[in-house]
Image: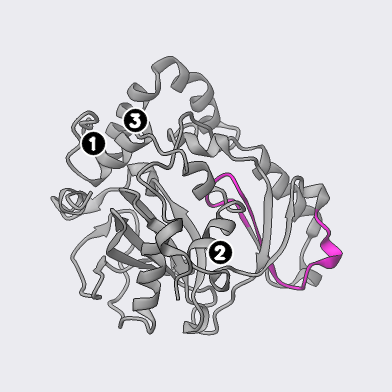
């Protein structure tokens, strides 16, 4: 089922170095003025303190948060730009897991002005290659202001995503627009995301995220036993039964994770049918998400 797993897995390496930033405004000003003056390490320490309430141990990280932040600053992972690039990663997924797990691709555009709107179907999803959360979902093209969509995508392309958060790999990605099939879900409106936390190529924890309700239940282990861990910033959803084809999804996630020390692999199951790749995330929440209860971050980080 998983194509070329032996020869195509990543080794521990997968990144390079340097940062990027977000939209114009306060965050952009901080990224361009404060971060260069403080330096990446001091900036990371101060932002970690602001988000989590204590200074991190970056040289000898003790928990998941600190290990993610240390990775951002010190890890040598040359493949990171490719894995984070929403266009380039498609070739990797096709090679390692199989083309059948990719969402249908309509267009890739260097500029919003280059999008051929007439050739697109009535519903589609557009996102930029060089960041996270820069999406435009169109459910009915005939009722949509395509000029506003184009303007929004143009603004996304100008963002220097990741500079303030020290996710330097986004600066190595050419900003482009990827337009794919709109994935609808009859029960949940949008398909829920299965987030697989992989350590040294093995799935240890899974989170199921409802993007419509913006809620997630606690973590599950790979056998779908509920663990009492949760992100403080997101409401906790109800416990749910394990999905069908869970074993297949774990196999896909582990194939894509390869030998990386840590990566999160996100998959969709629209209408609880086929498995569709979403993205690979090297630094979830930039390492600044508070995990409750106390001690949970240390436990999760121990698998790293």
Looking at the image, is 288 positioned above or below residue 182?
above
Q: Residue at 44%, 62% (x, y): give it.
A: 266
Specify the farthest residue to the left: 295
Query: Picture quarter containing residue 183?
Result: bottom right
Measure how far apart labels 2 and 1 are at the Cα level: 42 Å
**Image location of residue 279, percent across then percent down:** 49, 58
Looking at the image, tell me whether mark 2 or mark 1 is earlier in sequence order: 1
- Asked if residue 284 lies left or right of residue 147, the reply is left
Measure how far apart labels 1 and 3 are at the Cα level: 22 Å
Q: Which labelled disc corresponds to residue 282? A: none
- Asked if residue 249 lies left or right of residue 153, the reply is left
Q: Which labelled disc corresponds to residue 94? A: 2
**Image location of residue 74, percent across then percent down:** 34, 30
Mark 2, Cα crowd under 10 Å, few <14 / some 14-19 / many 20+, is: some
Front position among marks 2 and 1: 2
Q: Which labelled disc corresponds to residue 53? A: 1
**Image location of residue 254, percent across then percent down:** 36, 63
> What is the magenta range?
115-135
- Asked if residue 286 lies left or right of residue 117, the reply is left
Instruction: Report helix, strand or loop for mark 2.
Output: helix
Front position among marks 2 and 3: 2
In reply to whether residue 134 is colored magenta, the answer given is yes
Instruction: Report helix, strand or loop for mark 3.
Output: helix
Q: Nearer the viewer, residue 186 or 79?
A: 79
Q: Residue at 20%, 44% (x, y): give it.
A: 63
Looking at the image, tell me whether mark 2 or mark 3 is earlier in sequence order: 3
């Amino acid at each position: 089922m998983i194509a070329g797993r032996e020869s195509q897995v990543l080794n521990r390496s997968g990144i390079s170095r340097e940062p990027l930033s977000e939209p114009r405004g306060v965050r952009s000003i901080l990224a361009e003025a404060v971060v260069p003056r403080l330096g990446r390490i001091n900036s990371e320490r101060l932002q970690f303190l602001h988000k989590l309430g204590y200074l991190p141990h970056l040289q000898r990280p003790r928990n998941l948060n600190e290990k993610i932040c240390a990775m951002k600053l010190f890890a040598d992972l040359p493949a990171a730009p490719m894995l984070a690039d929403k266009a380039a990663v498609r070739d990797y997924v096709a090679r390692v897991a199989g083309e059948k797990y990719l969402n249908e691709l309509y267009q890739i555009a260097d500029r919003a002005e280059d999008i051929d709107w007439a050739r697109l179907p009535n519903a589609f999803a557009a996102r930029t290659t060089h960041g996270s959360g820069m999406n435009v979902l169109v459910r009915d093209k005939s009722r949509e202001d395509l000029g506003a969509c184009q303007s929004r995508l143009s603004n996304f392309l100008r963002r220097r995503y990741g500079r303030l958060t020290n996710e330097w790999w986004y600066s190595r990605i050419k900003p482009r627009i990827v337009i794919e099939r709109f994935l609808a879900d009859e029960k949940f409106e949008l398909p829920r995301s299965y987030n697989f936390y992989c350590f040294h190529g093995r799935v240890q924890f899974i989170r199921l995220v409802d993007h419509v309700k913006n809620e997630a239940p606690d973590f599950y282990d790979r056998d779908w036993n509920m663990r009492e861990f949760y992100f403080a910033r997101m409401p906790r959803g109800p416990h749910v039964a394990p999905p069908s084809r869970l074993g297949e999804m774990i196999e896909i996630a582990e194939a894509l994770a390869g030998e990386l020390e840590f990566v999160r692999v996100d998959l969709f199951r629209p209408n609880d049918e086929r498995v569709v790749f979403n993205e690979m995330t090297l630094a979830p929440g930039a390492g600044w998400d508070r995990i409750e209860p106390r001690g949970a971050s240390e436990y999760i980080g121990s698998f790293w």
